[in-house]
Amino acid sequence: MRAGNTRARLVAAAVLAALALGTAACAEDTGGDPGSETGAGGMKTGLKIAFLPKQVNNPYFTTSDNGGKAAVEEFKGVYSETGPSEASPSAQVSYINTLSQQNTDVIVVSANDKDAICGALNEARTAGAKVVTFDSDTNPSCRDLFINQATAEGIAQNQVKLIAEAVGPDGGEIAILSATANATNQNAWIELMKAELAQPEYAKLKLVDTVYGDDQDQKSFTETQALLAKHPNLKGIISPTTVGVAAAARYLSGSTYKGKVQLTGLGTPNQMRAFVKDGTVKAFALWNPADLGYLAAYAGGALSSGLITGKEGDRFKAGKLGEFTVGKDATVLLGDPYTFNASNIDQFDF
Amino acid sequence: MAERIAPVRRVLGSWDVIVLLAVVAVATVGAFTIEGVASPRFWRFVALEALPIALIALPMTLVVITGEIDLSVASVLGLTCTVMGQLWVSGVTSLPLLIALCLLLGAVLGAVNGLFVTGFGLPSLAVTIGTLALYRGLAYVVLGDRAVANYPREWTSSAIAPIPGTTIPWMILVLAALAVVFAVVLHATPVGRALYAMGNNAEAARFAGVNVRLTKFWLFVATGTMSALAGVFWTLRFASARADNGSGLELAVVAAVLLGGVSIFGGRGALLGVLAAVALLGVLRNALQLAYVPANTLTVITGALLIASVVGPNVAGMLRERLRRRRSTAPTATPTT
């Protein structure tokens, strides 16, 4: 009897100890009083700006959130990053509710579901928070601004330019290694790339084939192999998908085509680092997630300071990135894709 | 006989009370140390988060008491959500009809589990790990990576509407009513006593005239149906039917059931403790989140609590057993009190 009770009491004590531990760990946060003063450019200081990525412990979002942190420190706000350890909408809702109760001034979020987190975001907005989405948008009715990383046109122009530079002035045959044959974004980019290739400056480049690796590593690898066997004069490959470009690079780097057939695409630095260093790939592109987070933080700050409302034509300054204008549907475009090459790739870890 | 049961009851009761006291303690300490815990909004959010877990935990408690388990509940929830979404897209616009169809689907999915477990005599752990994957897979067959989100606003807002004059969602009342039903069945009917008997010794229960198979079959049907109800709530609450809805929720449910003092080996536990455990996990999680505790630390704390909850009652039970044995073999020996 008594032993049982003692045991139970011990467990209860452990529960309380765990709680005490938790609360002690949190006491350190002493959020600044939001916004009585205004700093440079009319931006309020002390704004509580929270980044809520799709999930924490994800290198891509760690990079973007650190960009946001740098921005928040520049305009003397209070930065925090929070989020679920698994990328689920319901877990994100829980964190949005928490941020709303913490009287956060700006919630910068990458949505796990464009609808499921809407209710919670709107509840937070009713409570006074501004909501900025980045990387992955919600329904436009649930946020104040969306920071768009790149447009389809921007991606198409960038990819064609990169392959033209890699192949050199003599031009030659090129091919595209895409994801799936019915991927909407891929097909839109491919169409725009064809339009871009029709420009006189790219007259010497000839698109001879488009193949599909289905965003599977093995299939992308064998499709690359087949492509090179089929077109012996091939000079370059564009693979505007992270899976495809990494698989193609792996094939090329282990083949006799290395350095002879050029490759570019949309990839991440961690996947592509080895192939840039061994000369298989001269340059590839994606957006810079750090800049994306940086811009999102400034946009949130400007919203919360009342400098902009999020309507089309609103202009605001975003520190080192310069001035931005709010476009259609309350979106702000980060700019052209960011090009990674041997000289800058080591600055990135995602 | 009565003398021997009484102290056991008292100890069982005390575990429930301990968990309840822990909820009160966490809430009180939180209210004084963490800004926001004392606000009515906090309790609204906790209630909304705990509701689906509590709904499924009710039948799960009974299942675990009989010595079985149902790990497919979150997949039943997910499949129900996608079917509800697909039905809505295909033109079923009556909410009562949608709910009825979803509950029916849940009952069928539960019956499949029940059939495999009781009809073929397979272990429920293996069966429901299988259907966990199967039902989730079917959910992806129904909706793929699409999401259905265009439900009427009245539906979605009424699902989370508060009881007038409070911030607490009215669905809590539905939960309370169902909890009373389950509690009465478990604690005040011959069926309930039979469930404990099955958990302690299925063979003996059978000889005592309990239809073990049939009872277990209906328990799985009940679990499926309640998971489907949670799925309907989930879909409307998040206004989004997706194949990955509620993924991983089965662990939250089982965690609450075990923390609530139900023995994983069956035969022991009470509904009050389980509901208190759902509340404890919800309050603790939300309070710590408010206190800026990072997600990784939260997971560690929840895990540690779970281990404590499994180890705690079992060690207590072992000690009790040893004590009792010592008493009965050496009745003259002084107990360790």
Image: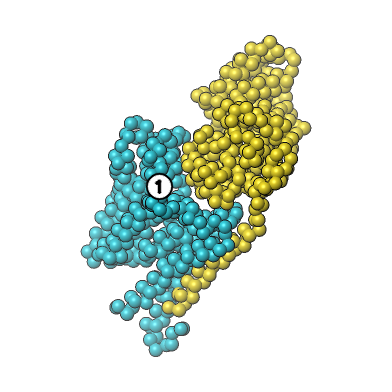
Looking at the picture, how far across and down is residue B319, in whole percent? 45, 75
Q: Which amino acid does label 1 sit on?
A: Ala
Q: Which colour scheme is used?
A: by chain
Q: Nearer the viewer, residue A170 or B126?
A: A170
Q: Tell me the SS state at disc 1.
A: loop
Is B254 located above or below residue A63 in the figure? below
Could one spot residue A272 in this view of the protein?
A: no
Chain under numbered label 1: B
Quadrant containing the N terminus of chain A is: bottom left
| Residue occupying the point 30% across, 65% down | B187
Residue in the picture at 39% in, 45% down? B159
Task: Determine the colour of chain B.
Answer: cyan
> Residue B259 appears at what percent x and percent y?
45, 62
Does residue B37 appear in the picture of this structure? Answer: yes
Task: In the rendered view, tell whether residue B174 sits above or below residue A129.
Answer: below
Q: Where is residue B321 in the image (x, y as percent from the top left)?
A: 41, 75
Quadrant (top left/top right/bottom left/bottom right) for the C terminus of chain A: top right
Quick check: A252 left or right of B213? Answer: right
Which residue is at 60% across, 24% downward?
A152
- The residue that mark 1 highlights is B161
- The x, y position of residue B54, in whole percent, is 40, 55
Quadrant in which residue B93 is drawn: top left
A280 shown above or below B68: above
Q: Residue at x 34, y 53 (%)?
A: B174
Sort mark 1 into few (<14), some (14-19) or many (20+) by Cα contacts within 10 Å.
some
The yellow-coloured chain is labelled A
